[in-house]
Image (tube, rainbow, N blue to C red):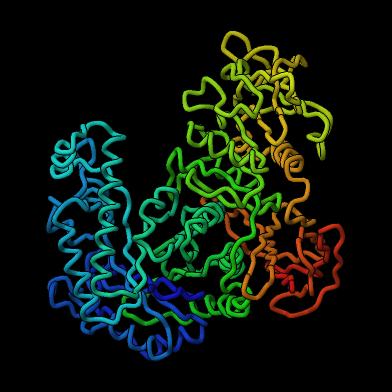
């Protein structure tokens, strides 16, 4: 059985050039480990081999790969010093980026469809040439891993840069042709590359397990998504690399964690101490930003990892660990309310990645938009895929681009028959050919793409809550649909005088409304609501408040008694977790506001307190007490008609409230 993850990890990069002398010369094992202890770190990933291709232990199998200016068994010293203090040390090795191997064995490199090597050109700085895992390079990796397992105490293995490859090297082309695959067929070639990658993971994990039954195993690709489900058994856990200032942004981690946690493995969030991203030497993340990122990991059922890079001389930076320690001391205080915690959710969002694919910096816009809206509305939700068991959810959301084949249609029909509700938008709910709705329950006929864009939505009745009684522009083209006689039209669509073209246009941006309504915009039939526009993509691109309110108003119709209601600004995040063994719920409240202060990314500098925050929760059993955590301060509360009400006196960045049952 694999070891349990720790809550306070550091991922210690050590990608170090051969043009720097004195590698590890100033390393002091005791100072190294004691610095970690003072910073409340209880797990640290250390390097066996880096992207430059150098090794940092006394390899006998690859003596020529030891860093040429390293004069000590650095990795062993790191492990021994940490183990003396009870600190876990997973071992890092690189997979697809290795500069030395790329130089020595160009025949092992991935080749693009244009015949060029994949990655860094010869005369540009960087070690990003991609090695193909369908070549004898894998034999080199096995020998390297075998040596690690045979000569070092291995708590875990972190295999980095293990990404689906699109390779047209001679070996891949020959294997594709032998399997009856046309190598020039891009989608088929990429599917072959994914199979190569999954085969590598499965075989490497078997290889590791033959030698070590207990170490953790993780393959890093900078992102975890639905493509990981078929190969999840090759992993012991997921580490969710997500440096908000390094290109991932502040929305990536919530999306990824809300999906990854449904796959049944422990999750570890990973951010960095860097102001920007990996290898940003002598930079420091704002402490408020690092605190938010770590507390959000706890709130979303992940443990914490903070990336750092050891300087070439091996002298650990005390100032970095003052920063990390300031946050990790608070993480440690919160751990008793996070151990074994599981999310309490009621809304399932079908992850667009399961249909469109996705990666770290390119997640589908509809997925990002729906995550924003539901998080800002304080709904308790997971991202799911077509294989997820839906029986524990009350509402299923199909955002914008979810095609429904016959198998998924049957699963959704069963979900509705069992009492579930569905909210869909734009192309979602349509059969893959988009000619018809795959679900009769919507009471809709698909006419085709809307004839006008932009057009204007005219909400009525309950959809008007929080909105002025007028028309609202919908920036992106929607669908034209016809509603059955027994369906309720919640919003109509008003059309412009004409579409904007060179032949006829009006004003600066788009043609104003003619005031003439022409087709439905939002339709409800029983437990199913359909939006004709891509409201989630629209919200991601333009953030119109009316789109968010329309969606949240529709959810209020389907879910009139949500698990959590919290009064506060939209940036206030609320997540609800359960600790079954302790018979309690833990509500996390986070209020940090990322700002775009530079041109490239958002950051957080200030923590603004929120006072007297009103909370109500839907409960189904007697409540014995409500307390602030970790302060253990009792709060007055009341229960009425199945809802628990209390007020949190202050949220200063992050506050937990414990609801004790029994």
Residue 606 or residue 217, whichever sits in front = 217
The quarter of the picture where the C terminus appears is bottom right
Residue 454 location, quadrant: top right
Is residue 475 shown to the viewer in this render?
no
The residue closer to the viewer here, 7 or 470, is: 7
33 sits left or right of 7 in the view = left
Residue shown at 56%/32% (left/top)? 428
Relative height, residue 348 to residue 218 (above, below): above
Write down the quadrant of residue 150 in the picture.
bottom left
In the rendered structure, the answer to whether residue 488 lies left or right of residue 528 reads right
User: Does residue 572 appear to the left or right of 343 in the view shown?
Assistant: right
Question: Residue 33, image x and y in percent?
Answer: 41, 87
Residue depicted at x 52% and y 82%? 40
Foreground of the two, 360 or 178: 178
Query: Which residue is nearer to you in this view: 367 or 529?
Result: 529
Q: Give the image location of residue 286, x and y in percent.
A: 57, 67
Q: Is residue 617 above or below residue 273?
A: above
Question: What residue is drawn where x is 59% and y is 20%?
Answer: 446
Q: Residue at x 71, y 29 (%)?
A: 525
For this orientation, the residue located farthest to the top is 503
For the N terminus, the image quarter is bottom left
Looking at the image, can residue 630 be seen?
yes
- Vertical position of residue 461 compared to residue 282: above or below: above
- Which x, y percent locates residue 244? 52, 57
Q: Above or below — where is 185 with respect to 222?
A: above
Could you tell whether 144 is left or right of 85 in the image? left
- The count of marks equals 0
């Amino acid at each position: 059985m694999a070891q349990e993850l720790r809550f306070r990890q550091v991922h210690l990069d050590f990608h170090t050039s051969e043009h720097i002398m004195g590698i590890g010369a100033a390393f002091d094992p005791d100072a190294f480990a004691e610095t970690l202890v003072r910073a409340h770190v209880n797990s640290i990933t250390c390097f066996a081999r880096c992207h430059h291709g150098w090794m940092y232990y006394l390899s006998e199998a690859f003596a020529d790969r030891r860093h040429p200016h390293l004069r000590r068994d650095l990795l062993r010293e790191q492990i021994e010093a940490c183990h003396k203090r009870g600190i876990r040390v997973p071992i890092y090795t690189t997979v697809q980026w290795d500069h030395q191997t790329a130089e020595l064995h160009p025949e092992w490199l991935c080749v693009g469809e244009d015949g060029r090597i994949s990655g860094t050109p010869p005369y540009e700085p960087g070690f990003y040439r991609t090695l193909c895992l369908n070549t004898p390079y894998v034999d080199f990796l096995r020998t390297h891993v075998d040596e690690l397992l045979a000569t070092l105490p291995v708590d875990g293995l972190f295999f980095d840069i293990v990404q689906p490859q699109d390779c047209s090297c001679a070996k891949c082309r020959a294997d594709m042709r032998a399997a009856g695959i046309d190598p020039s067929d891009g989608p088929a070639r990429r599917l072959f590359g994914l199979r190569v990658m999954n085969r590598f993971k499965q075989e490497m994990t078997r290889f590791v397990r033959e030698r070590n039954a207990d170490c953790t195993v993780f393959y890093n690709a900078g992102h975890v998504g639905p493509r990981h489900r078929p190969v999840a058994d090759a992993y012991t856990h997921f580490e969710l690399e997500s440096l908000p200032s390094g290109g991932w942004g502040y929305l990536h981690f919530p999306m990824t964690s809300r999906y990854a946690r449904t796959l049944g493995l422990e999750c570890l969030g990973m951010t960095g101490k860097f102001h920007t991203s990996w290898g940003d030497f002598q930079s420091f993340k704002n402490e408020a930003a690092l605190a938010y990122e770590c507390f959000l990991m706890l709130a979303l059922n992940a443990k914490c990892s903070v990336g750092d890079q050891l300087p070439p001389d091996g002298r650990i930076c005390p100032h970095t660990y003052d920063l990390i320690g300031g946050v990790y001391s608070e993480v440690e205080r919160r751990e008793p309310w996070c151990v074994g915690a599981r999310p309490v959710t009621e809304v399932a969002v079908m992850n667009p990645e399961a249909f469109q694919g996705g990666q770290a910096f390119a997640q589908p816009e509809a997925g990002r938009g729906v995550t924003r809206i539901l998080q800002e509305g304080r709904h308790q939700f997971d991202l799911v895929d077509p294989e997820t068991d839906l029986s524990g959810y009350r509402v299923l959301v199909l955002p914008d681009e979810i095609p429904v084949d016959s198998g998924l249609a049957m699963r959704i029909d069963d979900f509705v028959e069992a009492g579930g509700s569905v909210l869909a938008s734009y192309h979602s709910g349509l059969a893959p050919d988009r000619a018809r709705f795959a679900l009769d329950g919507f009471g809709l006929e698909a006419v085709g793409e809307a004839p006008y864009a932009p057009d204007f939505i005219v909400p009525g009745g309950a959809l008007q809550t929080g909105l002025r009684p007028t028309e609202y522009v919908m920036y992106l083209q929607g669908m034209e649909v016809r509603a059955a006689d027994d369906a309720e039209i919640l919003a109509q669509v008003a059309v412009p005088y004409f579409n904007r073209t060179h032949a006829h246009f009006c004003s600066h941006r788009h043609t104003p409304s003619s005031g003439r309504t022409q087709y439905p915009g939002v339709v409800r039939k029983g437990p199913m609501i359909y939006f004709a526009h891509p409201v989630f993509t629209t919200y991601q691109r333009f953030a119109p408040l009316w789109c968010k309110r329309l969606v949240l108003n529709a959810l209020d119709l389907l879910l009139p008694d949500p698990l959590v209601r919290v009064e506060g600004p939209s940036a206030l995040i609320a997540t609800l977790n359960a600790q079954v063994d302790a018979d309690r719920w833990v509500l996390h409240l986070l209020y940090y506001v990322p700002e775009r202060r530079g041109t490239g990314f958002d950051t957080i500098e200030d923590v603004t307190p929120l006072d007297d925050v009103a909370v109500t929760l839907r409960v189904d059993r007697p409540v014995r007490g409500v307390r602030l955590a970790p302060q253990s301060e009792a709060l007055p509360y009341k229960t009425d008609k199945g809802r628990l009400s209390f007020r949190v006196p202050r949220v200063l960045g992050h506050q937990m409230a414990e609801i004790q049952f029994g």
